[in-house]
Every structure is written in C-alpha cells, then in structure tokens.
Amino acid sequence: MPPRSPIPAPSFRRNLPLYARERSFPAYRFVPGLYPHPTRDPKGHSYQSGRPQEHPSWSPDQWNTLETYLRGVDLFNRFYFWEAHEVWEALWTSLPANNDAARFLQGIIHITASFLKIHMNEISASQKLWDSALALLEPFKENTWMGIEVNRLLKEVEVYLLPIKRGSVPTIGGNTPSIQLVIKI
C-alpha cells in the first residue's frame, strides 16, 4: 500500500515569484486517502467551489494574463499538485484535443500528476505519466512556450526522476523542479 503522508510545504521556495493575483492557498495539499476529497467531500478545502467552470476561449499568446494558467503555476511551484492539475484541466478541456496549446497543457498536467504519484510511491504510474508528458511536450522542446523554457523543464524533471532507474524514489522537496516563467518586459 502506498504511503499516505502529507506533501511537505516548500518553505525554501519563498523566493519564487507568485504569478497570479490570487495569493491564498488551500488548507492542505490533497493526497488521495489522506485528506477529504477537495471538491466532493463537505470537509474538502474547495467543497463550495465544486469543479472548475468551463473556461472561455483563450490562446497561448495570452498566457501572461491568463489567471487560470498563472494560478496553476503558483500551485505547482508550492507542491499543490492535485490542485494545479484541476486548475489547468479547465483550460485544457476548453480547447480541441488536437490543438497545440491543449497538448502542451496536457503535458504539463502529466508532469504534475507524475509528481503526485511519486509522493504516493506509485512509481509505475509516475513513470507512465512522465513518458506521456515527454511525448506530448517533445514538439515544444526547443522553444519557450507559454512562458516556460520547455527544454529546461524537461531536463530538470528527467534529472529529478533519475533515482527511479537506480531503484530509489525521489522525494518531494528541494530537488523537485519548479516552473519559472520567462516574463518579457
């Protein structure tokens, strides 16, 4: 049975910028089996908000003003992996499946889910999600896309997941990759 422990708060990440206007964070980082489901359980941290509403039409060039996207980055960087996935999913599902932006977001979502599975010690599931993320993000590899230097992020995730090949499990902490957006002024 996978361990059910809280995801640690990344106090060492206080120097990372907050990109979205919303600066508050949920009461806990959801881990299945440890906490009440955030939206389905009356004790969940986002129970009243329910599932995210359908997101209006958007385009990738709007990323730096797209609050939902920026909120997902802030959640990801502070190890709210399930919550970041949920936020980004609203954007992802608002686009046709064959859309570049949809594939890009799906790749980022798969990295996020992979990290949650790492924490839950579900290594096989984490590896499958990472493999899928890599395939989805391959076309963006040499670019900065929606503010993310894709090649850099992919290399950081690959290094982070290397212990799996040696039979150990990486931990969520100081070596966990973050998303640092390239903001052009």
Image: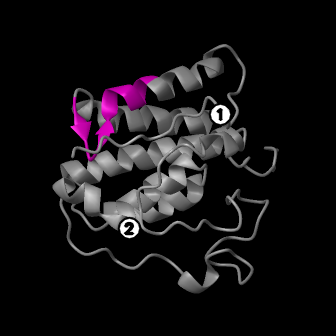
Asked if the magenta segment contains residue 146, the reply would be yes
Q: Which mark is residue 101?
A: none
**Crowd tier of the residue under label 1, counting other residues whose Cα lies within 10 Å: few below 14, some 14–19, many 20 or above:** many
Q: Residue furthest top?
A: 166
Asked if the magenta segment contains residue 54, the reply would be no
Residue at image position (23%, 26%) is: 142
Q: Give the quadrant of residue 115.
A: top right
**Residue 15 coordinates in the image, percent (x, y):** 55, 43
Residue at image position (55%, 41%) is: 114
**Residue 127 coordinates in the image, percent (x, y):** 55, 32
Q: Secondary structure at mark 2?
A: helix
Q: Quadrant of the N terminus?
A: top right
Q: Which residue is mark 1?
A: 123
Gap between marks 2 and 1, in whole Å?
26 Å
Q: Which mark is residue 90?
A: 2
In the image, is 63 to the left or to the right of 158?
left
Q: Give the quadrant of residue 11.
A: top right
Could you say which is closer to the camera, residue 62 or residue 107? 62
Amino acid beneath label 2: Ala
Residue at image position (38%, 65%) is: 68
In the image, is 70 to the left or to the right of 47?
left
Say if 173 sits above or below 42 in the image: above
Q: Which residues are magenta?
A: 143-155
